[in-house]
Structure formats: structure tokens, C-alpha cells
Image (cartoon, rainbow, N blue to C red):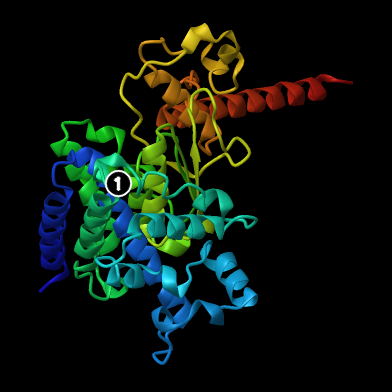
Amino acid sequence: MTSTQQFDELKRRIWQIANDVRGTVDGWDFKQYVLGALFYRFISENFARYIEGGDESIHYAELDDDVITGEIKDDAIKTKGYFIYPSQLFSNVVARANDNEDLNTDLKAVFTGIESSAMGYASEEDIKGLFDDFDTTSNRLGRTVKDKNSRLAAVLKGVNELDFGHFEDSEIDLFGDAYEYLIGNYAANAGKSGGEFFTPQHVSKLIAQLAIHGQKSVNKVYDPAAGSGSLLLQAKKHMADHLIEDGFFGQEINHTTYNLARMNMFLHNVNYDKFNMQLGNTLTEPYFREDKPFDAIVSNPPYSVKWIGSDDPTLINDERFAPASVLAPKSKADFGFVMHCLNYLSVSSYVEAKDTREVVNITELNQEIETTVSKINGLRRDIDTIVAEIERREP
């Protein structure tokens, strides 16, 4: 089976699981549990492989938590950005899910433990709140604890049955692409605007190609309306990893989508020190002023979204908007996003001044010069003749 056929089969299976286990819960509301379980499995397997370091004699999932020393934990967090004890791994949790009467609270404790492991480290802001939308106590899962646990177990088992193979050796990014596939399908089936959460891959690819066309190396890529991060990840796919040296930067206004973007980075093997995602309104609370200019900007901002505009008189003095001497209308912020991007991009000018110099025909100019030189030479000969005649007449 080719990698493409494998992914097609994976998509069919993962969508079937997503629908089978959700029961009466609305698909759009239930997406966080499937996406969260997929993410939980990925970081568990990714972390276990890191600890094992290719040593086939080590099986991290089989170790006792007690064997983990402070030094091991510290080194792992500095490298991976988080820590997962053997007992917290997806494979161990799913193995006892059916018989665990405390599954919902145990899961919550695992997620809290993973997030809190980064506290005090450089990765703290990248890990903080990643599982906020995976609410294991929500009534969406069922009215009773038993109902909640039953549905959570079904989600974990369904995701566990997905065959990703040795995905690190695959020609396609199975985990990451399956994640984006789910986001897109959930949006389409819920009748929502997919553009709020992701940009279709064929559009993302075109934008990424245009943004980095002709550039042999890119230090920083930025998206001011990052959504789930699909555009930034297309830039990653379009260029070799080592060419994007300082990583990926993005800002997103929607909290759920912001979490999806951070998860999406991890799912595509972008380490915490190679991305910086921030939550907030790009037009009124922009991040990364100290990080600009950026070598490339890829973005699909929300079309004709409303914003505060002229109701905030201080915005006209903002360095992003001041050059235009006017703000985008409150009913359509499109021009505001354009001005923001231009201010953050690494170019010295955006419009070249019109060249008003006279157009010169070089051939005609050379002929005119030749004629002028000939006349000058004739004049010099005439002057020489006159001077000689004067000298002869002198006594």
C-alpha cells in the first residue's frame, strides 16, 4: 500500500471512529475529544521514542515512574518542552480505560501533569492550557460519571486502533495531516466557515509558494491570523526544515483555534523552541513587534471582519497605520491587515518612486556626439589657422 493509499484509508477510518463514538453529541462540539486524543497519543509516542533513544532494549511504557530521576526529567523538559511519566502515556491509560471507574478524573490529572511539567521552563507558555478544551467532566460526554467514562474510553480506544505505522519514516505526515483532515471535515459538516479555523491545503500551498518564491533561506515565517496553523505548516513543507532557522510565529484571536494551532505544531514535529503562538487580537494587541521584520508572511485573514477602527483614536498614530493617514473602515478590517503585514515584512520599501528621467536613445546620442566632436575639431583647426596667420603678420 502506498503512502497516499495508506492516508486515504486512515482518513476513512478516523472519520468513522469520530462519528461512531460521539453518539448524540454534536460533531462540532465533540471534535475536541477526538483531536485531543489524537494529540495525546502523538506526544506520548513521540516522547517515549525520545527517552528510548533508539535503544531496542528500553521500553519506556513498561518502566515504573519511580525510576525517573530529577536529572532525567529536567533534561527532557529542556529538550522536548514537557514531561510524561510512563504511567501517563497514552498506551498505558488506554489499556486500562474500560475498567477504570475514575477515567475522567485520571485523564484530567494526566493532562494537568503534562502541562505543569513545563512550569518554570522556557516552554511554559507553549504548553500551558493545551488541553483546556478536552474537558473530561463536561456534560456533553454524558450525565453520569459512568456515561462520561464510557464515551472517553471509546474515544481513546478508537484513536488507539488507528494504524499510523512508522509514521516518522512515511512520505507524508500522517499524524499532522490526519489532524488537519479532521478539522476540515468537522467544519464542513457543522456548516461553519472553515476559513476561521484552517485554510484548505491547495490554497495554503499556493500562498506559501508565493510568499517564499525565490528565497533560498528563510529565518522567520509569520501569520497574523494563524487559525490552526495550516499556512505556517505549508511553508514548512515547501522548504527544507533547516532553511527556516528561527521558526514559526503566529497570532490567533480564537482561544480554541489557538490551542489547535499549538497542537498542530507539535503534531508536525515542530519543537516548542521553533514556534511562538500568541493569543489575542492582531489589529489592536499585536505581538512580535520586537521580532520583526519577518522574511515571509503567509496569511488568510478573516474577510471583511469588523473591528474598532476609528472608535479608537490612538490607532491612527500606530506605526502600522500612520503611513496611510487613514484607518480601515470599521465594517471591513481588510486594509488594516494589509498595513499590519507590510509593517512586519522585511522589505525596505513597498512602492518604487516613478522614474521621471528622460528616456535616451543611445544610438542617436552617439551619432549626435560624433557630429558635435567633428564640429569641435573643425573649429579647433580654424582657430589654429587664424592664430598662425596672426603670427606671420607680426613684425
> Relative to the observer, which residue lies in front, 289 or 116?
116
Q: Is 317 rendered above or below residue 274?
A: above
Horizontal side of 327 relative to 228 (left or right) equals right
Residue reaching furthest bottom? 57
x and y percent of residue 388 in the render? 75, 26
Residue identifier under label 1: 32
Q: Is 45 rendered above or below residue 14?
A: below
Q: Residue at x 36, y 14 (%)?
A: 332
x and y percent of residue 310 in the render? 50, 7
Quadrant containing the C terminus is: top right
Horizontal side of 355 relative to 25 (left or right) equals right
Mark 1: few/some/many CA within 10 Å (<14, 14-19, 20+): some
- SS for dot 1: helix
- Asked whether residue 21 appears in the rendered view, the answer is yes
> Relative to the observer, which residue lies in front, 132 or 142?
142
Q: Residue at x 40, y 85 (%)?
A: 59
Q: Residue at x 16, y 57 (%)?
A: 14
- Asked whether residue 298 appears in the rendered view, the answer is no
Name the amino acid type tagged 1.
Gln
Residue reaching furthest right? 395
Where is residue 301, by image quadrant?
A: top left
> Relative to the observer, which residue lies in front, 48 or 240?
48
Horizontal side of 209 relative to 382 (left or right) equals left
x and y percent of residue 115 in the render? 51, 55
x and y percent of residue 343 in the render? 53, 29
Disc count in the image? 1
Where is residue 29, by image quadrant?
A: top left
Quadrant containing the N terminus is: bottom left
Q: Is 111 rendered above or below residue 67?
A: above
